Amino acid sequence: MDFPRLVYRSATEHLSVETEEQHVAALKDGWFASVPEAEAKKNAIAEAETAPAPVSAPKATAGKGKQAIAAPAPVSAPWVQE
């Protein structure tokens, strides 16, 4: 790979790196080797931020000021053989 070279965050934001070490560090820090890669990531982030939050099932916990419901105690009956 030839140096110096550019890395990109968008089509208008770029950074010049002088060595392989700087190049690797920049890529780990969120820079990209090409404009198309940078724009694809930028678009993916924008879509994720505007997507509706996933619906999750309600949690089985007691609400504020309410007592949790305990499991019923075992019942002993004369017709039950243990």
Image (cartoon, grey):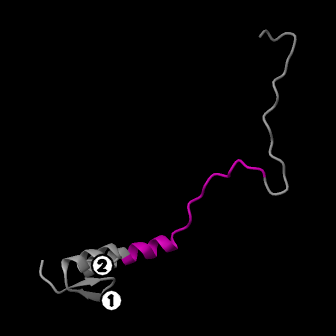
> Is residue 17 found left or right of 10 in the rendered image?
left
Mark 2, residue position: 26
Dots 2 and 1: beta carbons under 8 Å? no
**Which of 24 and 77 lies nearest the eye of the viewer?**
24
Q: Residue furthest left?
A: 2
| Secondary structure at numbered mark 1 | loop
Alpha carbons under labels 2 and 1: distance apart: 13 Å
**Which of 18 and 35 lies nearest the eye of the viewer?**
18
Q: Quadrant of residue 22?
A: bottom left
Which range of residues does the magenta coloring cover?
42-62
Q: Is residue 4 above or below residue 65?
A: below
Question: Looking at the figure, which quarter contains the N terminus?
Answer: bottom left
Residue 64 magenta-highlighted: no
Q: Is residue 71 above or below residue 6?
A: above
Instruction: Name the amino acid type tagged 2.
Output: Ala
Instruction: Name the amino acid type tagged 1.
Output: Glu
Horizontal and vertical percent for residue 13?
Answer: 33, 89
* Precedes in sequence: disc 2 or disc 1: 1
Q: Nearer the viewer, mark 2 or mark 1?
A: 2
- Looking at the rendered structure, the number of numbered marks drawn on it comes to 2
Q: Quadrant of residue 40?
A: bottom left
Q: Residue at left 80%, top 38%?
A: 70
Question: How busy is the neighbourhood of tag 2: few (under 14 within 10 Å), some, or many (20 plus)?
Answer: some
Mark 1, residue position: 13
Horizontal and vertical percent for residue 10?
Answer: 33, 84
Q: Residue at left 51%, top 69%?
A: 51
Residue 52 magenta-highlighted: yes
Horizontal and vertical percent for residue 5?
Answer: 19, 85
Horizontal and vertical percent for residue 72?
Answer: 81, 31
Q: Residue at left 85%, top 56%?
A: 65
